[in-house]
Image (spheres, rainbow, N blue to C red):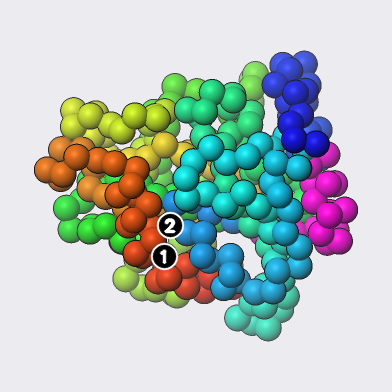
Amino acid sequence: MTTTPELDDPSTDPFLVARAAADHIAEATGIDGHDMALVLGSGWGGAAELLGDVVAEIPTHEIPGFSRPAVAGHVATTRSIRVERVDGSVRYALVLGSRTHLYEGKGVRRVVHGVRTAAATGAQALVLTNGCGGLQPDWSPGTPVLIADHLNLTATSPLEGATFVDLTDLYSTRLRDMARRVDPTLPEGVYAQFPGPHYETPAEVRMAGTLGADLVGMSTTLEAIAARHAGLEVLGLSLVTNLAAGISATPLSHTEVIEAGQAAGPRISALLADIAKAV
């Protein structure tokens, strides 16, 4: 099953589609439940191989509600991985190698379907990663940054109706502290999501900076909101792949994003794997 049209039907409960996706994953992997989930954005894909033993690998588009990735640098599979934690216990991680972006025009339900599916598999914690533009000149390309808060500049929300969710501590202080135990040098900042797919103008970057942003990109915030609503504890990590427009004199390109991710890949993948084993 490559698509689930019912997910786009306003009369359909999107959590029922997430439940169907979770049931498919359980049947395909032989794992009844997963303890945590990771969404691997640009540059972070190598972490999956360092987490532990792959129990099963599923073409993502075969899972109800999912489709093939539309962005270069994203992996087209979903993996179930057996993770041996630093305390000796064993957990199972659901690793989503691709995400649906808002700019693909498939609707916000599909953007957050992976998160809701992760919650339906039993996950308690979610690690969201991305590649992004940096506003801090001393954060050179290849710098990993913890997300402390966000600005949702997409003019939409994954929540429907009178659904009121507190986002005060959306990006878990506890998980950020655990990440800093793995790497005390990790900086943290505020991530601003624009709708894309075009890169931000220098004026928009200045606006975001005035509002308090340190990072700009085209993903993550809607997923984080949906995750909080679903009861997941969220850790966000950005990889600065380029300086944002107006911060750098160099024109922006997606090729630059991919190249920066590839260059930083081994180092940040090892970092992410170590953090995941500690969470």
State the residue in front, 181 or 145. Answer: 145
Picture residue at 22% right of the left edge, 48% below the top: 243
User: Label 2 sits on what residue type?
Assistant: Gly
Image quadrant in which you'd find residue 204: top left
- Tell me the crowding category of disc 2: few under 14, some 14 to 19, or many 20 or more residues within 10 angstroms, Cα based: many
Q: What stretch is highlighted in magenta?
A: 20-36
- Does the stretch in magenta take in 192? no
Asked which secondary structure carries label 1, the reply is helix
Asked which secondary structure carries label 2, the reply is loop
Total marks shown come to 2
Quadrant where the image shows the N terminus: top right
- Tell me the crowding category of disc 1: few under 14, some 14 to 19, or many 20 or more residues within 10 angstroms, Cα based: many
Circle on res. 43: 2
Q: Is residue 146 above or below residue 70?
A: below
Whole-percent x, y for residue 200 in the image: 28, 31
* Label 2 with label 1: CB-CB less than 8 Å: yes
Which residue is the site of mark 1? Answer: 265
